[in-house]
Image (tube, rainbow, N blue to C red):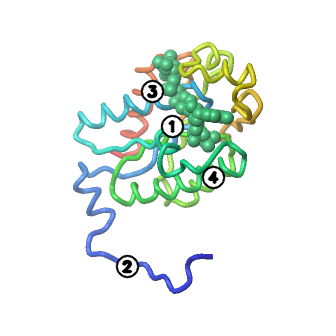
Amino acid sequence: MGQKNITWHQGHISKSDRQKLNNKIKSAVLWFTGLSGSGKSTIAVEIEKELYHAGILSYRLDGDNIRHGLNRDLGFTPQERTENIRRIGEVSKLFVDAGILTLASFISPYRKDREMVRNLLDKGEFVEVYVKCDLSECEKRDPKGLYKKARNGEIKSFTGIHSPYEEPISPEIIVETDKQTLQESVNQILNYLIKNKYM
Ligand SMILES: Nc1ncnc2c1ncn2[C@@H]1O[C@H](COP(=O)(O)OS(=O)(=O)O)[C@@H](OP(=O)(O)O)[C@H]1O
Ligand SMILES: Nc1ncnc2c1ncn2[C@@H]1O[C@H](COP(=O)(O)OP(=O)(O)O)[C@@H](O)[C@H]1O
């Protein structure tokens, strides 16, 4: 497609040089997937804080924010969601190359789209975190009032109501936010990162 007459320009400083500057971490993307209201953003915000206090640079990419800027032209049809995730996958790859622990929180409802992002990255650089929470609990929380709008027809194609969510089959991490506390989920994820030598 667009690769004709394009060559990669190699610099003097590598990904691993940049990781050394970032407290010697192994950079990766923590890919939070789950229903709206499951807790993806809430958990990512806490992880970012803990990493910051440990002297580690991380950066959050979040559905609502990215859709205000980079992906403002995209809606919620299956094709647009796929393009949304494809672009975020490419952005995540750049952040990982920059040596940053990247925290991506997107519903990303389609398994094939998440696998596409996994395949964009090197082995071990895509850590899928399934933020599992019953639809009924998400709907009860309804932090932005979107489920209410979806139920009364103001929003069409809302995930979980009229649009599918495909659960991950073998994610690296599952946190169950309707059964565990926020701090338990945060600790579980940080322990995974330590155990697997990301930090
Ligand atoms: N139809 C529909 N379905 C799902 N979500 C909707 C919809 N319309 C708007 N919103 C709001 O957009 C946020 C989801 O954006 P994402 O980029 O994460 O979605 S996706 O991965 O492309 O499916 C989602 O944010 P979160 O609640 O943080 O998940 C909603 O606030
Ligand atoms: N154990 C928990 N883990 C994460 N969030 C929780 C938990 N219990 C309740 N919540 C609440 O659920 C809501 C999740 O919203 P949010 O993080 O925006 O979800 P998402 O980003 O998946 O749409 C927040 O209001 C949060 O305070």
Q: What residue sits right under mark 2 in the picture?
A: 9
* Residue type marked 2: His
Q: Where in the image, quadrant-wise, is ligand 1 located?
A: top right
- Picture residue at 77% right of the left edge, 31% below the top: 162
* CA distance separating discs 1 and 4: 22 Å
At 25% from the left and 51% from the top, the residue drawn is 22
Residue at the disc numbered 4: 115
Which one is earlier in the sequence, the residue at label 4 or at label 3?
3
Mark 2: C-beta under 8 Å from nearest atom of ligand 1 = no
Q: Vertical placement of 27 versus 58: above or below?
A: below
Label 4, label 2: how far apart the Cα atoms are: 27 Å
Spatial CA span between label 4 and label 3: 24 Å
Which residue is label 3 attached to?
A: 42
Residue linked to disc 1: 64
Quarter of the image that includes the C terminus: top left
Q: Residue furthest bottom?
A: 5
